[in-house]
Amino acid sequence: MAIENISDKNNPKTVARKKGFRDLDLKLVLHPFRKDIIPLKDANAVKNAVKNLILTNFFERPFQPALGANLRGLLFEPMDSITELAIEDNIRRVLLKEPRIKVIYINAESDEDANHYNLTVKFRIKQSDQEEQVAIVLRRLR
């Protein structure tokens, strides 16, 4: 009885493939024919997750009270470079908890005439080495 080598090195049976990311779009856009919510995929899903983490305040997520950037509290501070640094530090701290990305830079600029902050977060998705950017305008409502 002959014994065959099951693991043939010239003909591999397994192929490595990347698993795509999926996330629920919080805008809840419906598909026109299926009448179902359209999910976000890959880079758009990661960008949505980053934006959600930045805009989350403390105690907004059940069972994770410390998760969030808590930027709402900083909007009522004076518009100066110290507040800009605090915003950047809070964003950097919360994005360390997102395992899919590596932050490249974070920029918070105050626009005193319009009474808002322009946030720019540039990051690299670890799985695909793709660079993405999220821009957010932070303003307080009166």
Image: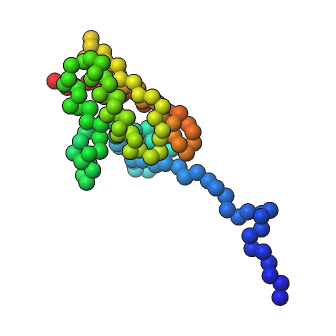
Q: Where does residue 35 sit, x and y in percent of width and height? A: 40, 49
Q: Quadrant of the N terminus?
A: bottom right
Examine the rendered structure and indicate whether residue 12 appears above or below residue 44: below
- In the depicted view, which residue is nearer to us: 105 or 52? 105
Examine the rendered structure and indicate whether residue 129 appears above or below residue 86: below
- In the depicted view, which residue is nearer to us: 64 or 47? 64
Q: Where does residue 107 sit, x and y in percent of width and height? A: 39, 24
- Residue 109 found in image quarter: top left
Looking at this view, name the residue that lies furthest to the top: 113
Q: Tell me if I can see residue 57 in this picture.
A: yes
Q: Tell me if I can see residue 38 in this picture.
A: no
Residue found 35% across the figure and 28% down from its top? 88
Residue found 30% across the figure and 15% down from its top? 111
Q: Where does residue 62 sit, x and y in percent of width and height? A: 24, 52
Residue found 21% across the figure and 19% down from its top? 78
Looking at this view, name the residue that lies furthest to the left: 142
Residue found 56% across the figure and 37% down from its top? 130
Q: Where does residue 117 sit, x and y in percent of width and height? A: 31, 21
